[in-house]
Image (cartoon, helix red, strand yellow):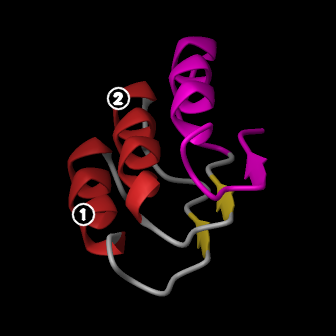
Amino acid sequence: LIDDEGMSMFAKKLKNSRVTAVRLTFNQISDMGASQLTADLIETQVRSLDLSFNKISSIGACHIAKNLEKTKVTYLNLS
């Protein structure tokens, strides 16, 4: 399972990659990890992001929404 620490390392690897879809369902990602990931997505080609079934609250969702405005993401799942 990926937690916030793993998410931070993963997000850094996405920079300058050709990845366009990220599906990280059923992990241990919290508000902090999700916020870090979406902040790092600014420098990526990711268009689809699925973070469903993690530990992201409404506070984390607000941080994600702010960060996504600066990315290429057009699909987001937080269910």
Residue 28: percent from the left, percent from the top? 43, 44
Q: Is residue 43 left or right of residue 56?
A: left
Give the secondary structure at mark 1.
Answer: helix
Q: Which mark is residue 60?
A: none
Q: Amino acid at mark 1?
A: Lys
Of the 4 image quadrants, the one containing the C terminus is: top right
Instruction: Give the residue at mark 1.
Output: 12
Q: Which residue is drawn at the image coordinates 44% and 26% (left, top)?
A: 31
How many C-alpha atoms fall within 10 Å of the one at disc 1: few (<14), some, or many (≥20)?
some
Of the 4 image quadrants, the one containing the N terminus is: bottom left
**In the depicted view, which residue is nearer to us: 78 or 74?**
74
Residue 21: percent from the left, percent from the top? 63, 74
Nearer the camera: disc 1 or disc 2 = 1
Q: Which residue is drawn at the image coordinates 48% and 87% (left, top)?
A: 18
Q: Which residue is drawn at the image coordinates 36% and 57% (left, top)?
A: 2
Q: From where the camera sits, is residue 50 visible? A: yes
Instruction: Give the residue at mark 2.
Output: 32
**In the depicted view, which residue is nearer to us: 54 or 46?**
46
**Residue 39 sits in quarter:** top left
Q: Amino acid at mark 2?
A: Met
Q: Is residue 6 left or right of residue 39?
A: left
Q: Is residue 55 magenta?
A: yes
Residue 70: percent from the left, percent from the top? 54, 42
Q: Which residues are magenta?
A: 53-79
In the rendered image, the residue lying farthest to the top is 59
